[in-house]
């Protein structure tokens, strides 16, 4: 289909005034012999030159035109084949062009500025049941159009819609495609679509690309909404500037054809280590993020989960928090070198219980210190306005209790984390 062949038996149209049509032996047997017009074809006796092109029956229009011939005579078919071979220019792609000599097609009954070049109409639309859903339109001298079927913009969804005979699903995708494209640099403060499967965490899709490429293929039920923190910049994995976008769209189309989402999952799982970088660990700072992991008071960020928790023997105990797509402000318990070292040592000893006990003490110590600071601030503020003796004794007593509790907790934590 994609390259010239210089061997084997080839076929052409007998007594063609212009010549040039060529069919391989396989297409002659599978397609041409299945038509009532096979007598008009014969073997090509001439030596095939270095410039021979590939089999013309591999062109979708020509195969469809030969097979779909209930009311056509041979002259009509030959005229259409000649037109497709010699008068239909190649698709201009996504470039805006002004060419009044071209023929264009537009979906019937819609005002959308959606135009299909002659090449894509005959090879992509004519062979389907939707060939009658389009009208021929004329481009004005000042108008510049690009082909809506260029590349994978709408052609992947078209193939799925044609197979399922659902024209409206393609129109909905086309309508979504008219909205502004997502930015390659990414954007922040938005709601993104992510796969529910935790194995595919790290891939996100904007609303526009979701409506153009994922939902029309029948995979919308595998997505959920996720809101990221306002300061976090997210890039859409279906932006055309991504080098893997074309391959991802091809995998989506194949998965839709086979009704097998596992095709997409396998590809993304292989791709993830090469393209996805989780947000850096925030350390001891509390930050708002939509993804956290942990259990029993232990919490870690995405980076620490991937790099430290997932490879450890404790991974089965650590689960992702269900935040319903909303970010939560937390700090990472593995955000310091000391605690990462403790985690490593407890992992080597497979002593998860003592690690959780230590984390519980750590959280208690943080809470006691916070209470002590707040009590000191309260005493300082009230002293400026005049503090009654009873209130002073109450606050001082509270401070003494908190200081003692802080000291005892610090000692127990030191003993428990000695490695």
Image (cartoon, rainbow, N blue to C red):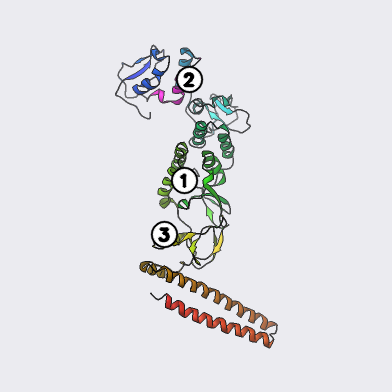
Image coordinates for residue 345, horizontal then vertical, percent: 38, 69
- Left or right of 159? Residue 377 is right
- The relative height of residue 412 versus residue 311 in the rendered view (above or below) is below
Looking at the rendered image, the quarter that the N terminus falls into is top left
Q: Which labelled disc corresponds to residue 310?
A: 3
- The relative height of residue 121 versus residue 311 in the rendered view (above or below) is above
Question: Which residue corresponds to mark 1?
Answer: 242
Question: Which residue corresponds to mark 2?
Answer: 68
Q: Nearer the viewer, residue 222 or 387?
A: 222
Residue at the location (56% across, 43% down)?
208
Q: Looking at the image, is mark 1 or mark 2 nearer the viewer?
A: 2
Q: Which labelled disc corresponds to residue 336?
A: none
**Residues at marks 1 and 2, CA–CA distance in whole angstroms:** 40 Å
User: Callout 2: 10 Å neighbours few (<14), some, many (20+)?
Assistant: few
Residue 20 visible within the image: no
Looking at the rendered image, the quarter that the C terminus falls into is bottom left
Image coordinates for residue 69, horizontal then vertical, percent: 48, 17
- Left or right of 256? Residue 29 is left
Count numbered badges in the picture: 3
Which region is colored magenta? 52-71
Q: Secondary structure at mark 3?
A: loop
Q: Looking at the image, is mark 3 or mark 1 nearer the viewer?
A: 3
User: Callout 1: 10 Å neighbours few (<14), some, many (20+)?
Assistant: some
**Residues at marks 3 and 2, CA–CA distance in whole angstroms:** 57 Å
Residue 322 visible within the image: yes
Q: Secondary structure at mark 1?
A: loop
**Residues at marks 3 and 1, CA–CA distance in whole angstroms:** 28 Å
């Amino acid at each position: 289909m994609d390259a010239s062949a210089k061997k084997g038996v080839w076929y052409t149209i007998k007594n063609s005034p212009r010549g040039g049509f060529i069919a391989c032996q396989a297409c002659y047997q599978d397609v041409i012999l299945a038509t009532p017009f096979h007598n008009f074809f014969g073997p090509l006796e001439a030596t095939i030159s270095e410039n021979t092109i590939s089999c013309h029956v591999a062109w979708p229009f020509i195969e469809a035109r030969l097979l779909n011939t209930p009311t056509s005579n041979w002259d009509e078919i030959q005229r259409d084949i000649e037109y497709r071979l010699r008068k239909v220019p190649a698709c201009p792609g996504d470039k805006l062009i002004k060419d009044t000599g071209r023929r264009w097609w537009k979906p019937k009954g819609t005002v959308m500025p959606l135009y299909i070049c002659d090449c894509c109409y005959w090879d992509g639309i004519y062979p389907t049941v939707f060939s009658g859903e389009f009208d021929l339109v004329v481009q004005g001298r000042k108008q510049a159009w690009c082909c809506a079927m260029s590349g994978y913009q709408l052609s992947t969804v078209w193939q799925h819609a044609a197979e399922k005979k659902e024209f409206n699903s393609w129109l909905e995708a086309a309508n979504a495609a008219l909205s502004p494209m997502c930015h390659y640099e990414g954007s922040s403060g938005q709601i993104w679509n992510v796969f529910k499967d935790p194995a595919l965490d790290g891939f996100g899709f904007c609303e526009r690309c979701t409506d153009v490429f994922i939902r029309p293929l029948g995979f919308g039920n595998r997505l959920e909404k996720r809101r990221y923190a306002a300061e976090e910049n997210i890039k859409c994995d279906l932006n055309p500037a991504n080098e893997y976008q074309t391959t991802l769209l091809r995998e989506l189309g194949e998965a839709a054809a086979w009704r097998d989402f596992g095709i997409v999952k396998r590809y993304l799982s292989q791709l993830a280590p090469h393209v996805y970088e989780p947000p850096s660990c925030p350390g001891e700072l509390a930050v708002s993020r939509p993804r956290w992991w942990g259990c029993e008071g232990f919490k870690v960020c995405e980076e620490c989960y991937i790099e430290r928790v997932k490879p450890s023997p404790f991974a089965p105990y650590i689960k992702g928090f269900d935040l319903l797509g909303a970010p939560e402000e937390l700090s990472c318990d593995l955000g310091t070198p000391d605690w990462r070292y403790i985690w490593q040592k407890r992992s080597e000893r497979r002593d998860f219980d003592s690690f959780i006990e230590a984390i519980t003490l750590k959280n208690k110590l943080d809470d006691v210190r916070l209470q002590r600071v707040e009590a000191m601030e309260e005493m300082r503020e009230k002293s400026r306005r005049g503090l009654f003796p009873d209130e002073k004794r109450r606050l001082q007593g509270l401070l003494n209790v908190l200081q003692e509790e802080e000291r005892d907790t610090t000692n127990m934590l030191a003993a428990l984390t000695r490695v």
